[in-house]
Image (cartoon, rainbow, N blue to C red):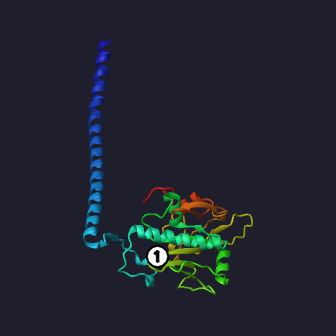
């Protein structure tokens, strides 16, 4: 038995002798990968810190101790915006809340169906208010509502600080609108606004198919995760109509407004499965 045991021990020693360099090699590789990852993360943190320092030293503007946010020209009605005005992040959020509440008040008083859309819907569902970095708002209406507003002469009495414009309207200002974003309510003291998109049913030859529903293809939906590209136009946001109706109550800021029936599916279509994680 002893010679057998000795041979077995020798064999195991040889196996460990072979495994040891492999183990060391893998350990070194893991350390190397970990080191590279840590270096990359450190560089990102340092660069982010440097950008914040540069922004604070050379780009940031303060008025009466209030930090003025830089507003993107692409999210402003320029004729209503004075570059010397100062709006903090809190100011912007309050203006956007006011815009959405103004639409909600007037539309609900006139029994006009509407729902929160895109980033505004995401803010309601995830934050219960405006997303911290958002600087506009989005509302959806159906085609029947758009035709009613476009062709009718009913008065929509918004507070004087707001201006309502609608594409091809017979008795309202057009305001340079088009079929991509047919409606807009503008806050005339800042140039910030809420966009109003028109959702239309897609025509289909299949009578038993569920109706699809969405606005005309547009670059406005360029970041939509599940929206197919449409050449030279942007992306097409189409969802089952049952995801929108019947509308339901949801919370936004300090009050209830209306949201799509299937908010989670709606947001997953727009932003993907990680929409609840701030990017």
Front-most of residues 3 and 118: 118
Front-most of residues 56 and 5: 56
Q: Is residue 276 left or right of residue 22?
A: right
State which quadrant residue 10 falls in.
Answer: top left
Front-most of residues 8 and 135: 135
Q: Is residue 112 left or right of residue 236?
A: right
In this view, the residue farthest toward the right is 207
Q: Is residue 235 above or below residue 32?
A: below
- Residue lying at 70% horizontally and 70% vertically, measured from the top left: 204
Q: Is residue 183 left or right of residue 135?
A: right
Q: Which residue has dot 1 on it? A: 192
The answer to whether one can see residue 25 in this image is yes
Q: Position of residue 16 (x, y in %)?
A: 29, 30
Q: Position of residue 193 (x, y in %)?
A: 49, 75
- Residue lying at 29% horizontally and 20% vertically, measured from the top left: 7
Q: Is residue 258 above or below residue 184?
A: above
- Residue lying at 51% horizontally and 73% vertically, measured from the top left: 220
Q: Which quarter of the rendering shows the N terminus?
A: top left
In this view, the residue farthest toward the top is 1
State which quadrant residue 166 falls in.
Answer: bottom right
Q: Position of residue 68 (x, y in %)?
A: 35, 72
Q: Which quarter of the rendering shows the C terminus?
A: bottom left
Q: Secondary structure at mark 1?
A: loop
Q: Position of residue 264 (x, y in %)?
A: 57, 57
């Amino acid at each position: 038995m002893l010679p057998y045991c000795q041979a077995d021990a020798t064999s195991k020693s040889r196996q460990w002798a072979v495994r040891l360099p492999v183990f060391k090699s893998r350990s070194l590789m893991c350390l190397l990968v970990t080191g590279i990852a840590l270096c990359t993360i450190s560089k990102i943190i340092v660069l982010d810190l440097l950008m914040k320092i540069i922004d604070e030293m050379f780009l940031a503007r303060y008025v009466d101790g209030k930090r003025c946010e830089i507003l993107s020209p692409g999210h402003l009605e320029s004729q209503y915006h004075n570059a010397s005005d100062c709006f903090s992040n809190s100011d912007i959020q309050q203006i956007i809340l006011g815009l959405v509440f103004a639409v909600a008040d007037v539309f609900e008083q006139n029994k006009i169906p509407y729902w929160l859309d895109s980033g505004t819907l995401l803010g309601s569902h995830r934050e219960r208010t405006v997303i911290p970095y958002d600087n506009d708002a989005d509302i959806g209406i159906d085609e029947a509502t758009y035709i009613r507003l476009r062709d009718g002469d009913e008065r929509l009495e918004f507070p004087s600080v707001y201006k309502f414009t609608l594409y091809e309207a017979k008795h309202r200002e057009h305001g340079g609108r088009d079929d991509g974003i047919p409606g807009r309510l503008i806050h005339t003291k800042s140039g910030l606004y809420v966009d109003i998109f028109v959702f239309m049913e897609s025509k289909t030859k299949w009578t038993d198919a569920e109706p699809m529903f969405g606005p005309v293809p547009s670059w406005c939906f360029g970041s939509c995760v599940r929206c197919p590209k449409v050449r030279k136009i942007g992306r097409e946001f189409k969802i089952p109509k049952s995801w929108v109706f019947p509308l339901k109550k949801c919370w936004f800021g300090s009050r209830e407004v209306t949201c799509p029936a299937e908010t989670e599916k709606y947001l997953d279509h727009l932003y993907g499965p990680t929409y609840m994680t701030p990017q």
